[in-house]
Image (cartoon, rainbow, N blue to C red):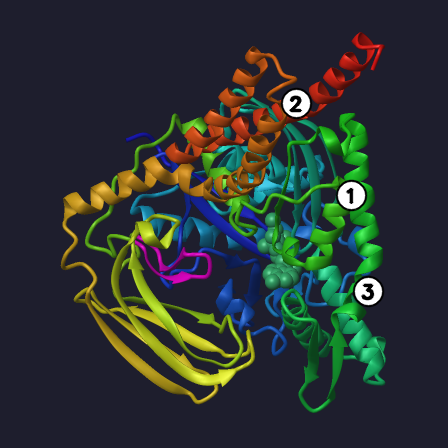
Amino acid sequence: MSEVIVGIDLGTTQSAVAVVDSGFPILLADQEGRTLLPSAVWYGVDGEIEVGHEALRRSGVDEVLTSVKSLMGRRVEESGGRLLGRGVLQTSAGEVTPEEVSAEILRSLKAVAEKRLETSVNKAVITVPAYFHDAQRAATKKAGEVAGLEVVRIVSEPTAAALSYGLDRLDERAKVAVFDLGGGTFDVSILEMREGVFEVSATAGDTQLGGDDFDDALAQDAVGKLGLSWGALEDLEKVRFINEARRLKHVLSDETEGMFRMPFTGEIEVSLEDFEKMMAPFLDRMESSCRRAMLDAGVDPSELDAVVMVGGSSRIPAVKERVRRVFQREPDLSQHPDEAIARGAAIQAGILAGTVREVLLLDVTPLSLGIETMGGLMNVLIARNTTIPCKAGEMFTNAADGQRSMKVRVLQGERELAEDNWELGSFEVPFQPARRGQARVGVEFRIDADGILSVLARDLATNEDLVIEVGSAAVDVNEAKVEQMVSESVEHAFEDMNARVFEEARLKADELLPAVEVALSEAGSVLEEGEIAQIKEARDQVIGAIEKREVAQLKKAVEDLDHATESLAALLVEKATQSLFSNPQD
Ligand code: ADP
Ligand code: MG
């Protein structure tokens, strides 16, 4: 086996490590099943260090270093004006540099990777914002070295996202814009993909624009409305305000209003409209970067084939809306906003390593466990190869008003669509009727040392628990079956990722086909036989592609048919005028 090279997304807010496993990039989970590591580090007085979730738990109570990435490769004076708790590098344990803090995060990711892969990991591909300059890249490399990782390549984040997007489109030619709005940085790149070549035509962005800014704006606004002065607040108070602002910001991605609550201080209602007003100046900056990228690349929005959105902040409705407006199209949301960069880094690592064929680890959870969520998708709670015992949970809500129960289907498998995985059991979780999206049902999966899966569901309104024994998750799954499921998942990975693209093309086809039939019946008299045959051929291609579920073929066939009907319309006009001229006596 060749040496492992991992791909790492060293993010401002969250970081992740990934590898290519059987040809498919996957994120590596920690022992709790978490794939995203908060980029947070806490230093104790006695030299104790905590990283990630553990560190973040102390936020607002003790000083925790976060968003240090925005200080990488910059002199501390240069960073002036940042809020405390972010980038203040004086710690209880003394002074630390941003590289050292980043090194702690990388060390944790290295440990996660080593644990998962059961091998030492000494090489990595690390991503940086496309807009990172040399010193920032060098600082990132240095952080890797401090953590004991040879950084074999630094990759730009949007390029990594494009790799992730393009992996299943290697034989296509396309111009895409990759839009990445994270916690601290914003990047937009225009890329040209052709036969597996990814060429960046232009990149623009802002290393000081991201979700942190929205948090700050919300926090400062709330402080003002509560009759306090931001400047007069203690540092840790500021952090608590910011944490609450972030919570509220996430709420406002799904709801039209929310409450900003500070214990012992007060609460205020914040509407989505208020929030969007605060967002406006940031959205304008974002927009100008987008326009610059297009200008530099010499492309018009209409020449782009897709605008791929990634980054946690791309979940914000106002951000999507602005992207829609600037690029004059529906954004492509096929990539996981939190995972695309790490996956892309892993693909790059796989390319450099000559693509590793990973050994399948058994005597762990052999396959991913999850439940079906809206749209018939598999929502993984415990990833394949998680060492047992383990547990993982997630919160769910109701899809309809007054709903009294929710059906939970427990699934096992590696496929994206629920129906393609195995059902281990299903049950109804009753809860108190609530408005749509108001019920809160926690579902937790636990696998004990014997490999027995139990599922616990809890209605947070009543705190009533429902424990369901699903039975041994491993019992009916032998090694051969696991191999089969995994190879199927690899075989179908592209198809699964393309499910959305297929559905979209099919919807378009549903619109086009009846229109074509009508046009054909009317145009029969004016069209030449050859032309009719051509349109029928395009129509049959579409029908054939739907039957065969051929994504790329369907996409192309629909485009062809669209063209054919365009020329059909033109032909009709042409023929009409021709007959007019050739029959002057009419
Ligand atoms: P980075 O690459 O900078 O680490 P990420 O891409 O992980 O950033 O995105 C993190 C940012 O996304 C944070 O500012 C976080 O608050 C924001 N975010 C995550 N989920 C949501 C959501 N549902 N609504 C709004 N913002 C979100
Ligand atoms: Mg990022």
Question: Looking at this rendering, what residue extends furthest in the front direction?
Answer: 585
Q: Mark 1 = which residue?
A: 326
What kind of element bears circle 2?
A: helix
Front-lying residue, 284 or 241: 284
* Point 21% across, 50% down: residue: 362
- How far apart are the two marked residues, 2 and 3, measured between alpha carbons? 49 Å
Q: Residues within 10 Å of mark 2 (few under 14, many from 20)?
A: many
Q: Which residue is mark 2?
A: 568
Tell me if residue 115 can be seen.
yes
**In x, y percent, where is residue 309?**
63, 45
Residue at (30% x, 56% y) in the render: 386
Q: What's the magenta region?
A: 368-384
Asked if residue 74 is positioned above or below residue 261 in the image, the reply reads above
Q: Label 2 sits on what residue type?
A: Leu
Q: CA distance from mark 1 to mark 3?
A: 19 Å
In the picture of the structure, the residue carrying the numbered disc 3 is 278
Q: Residue furthest top?
A: 582
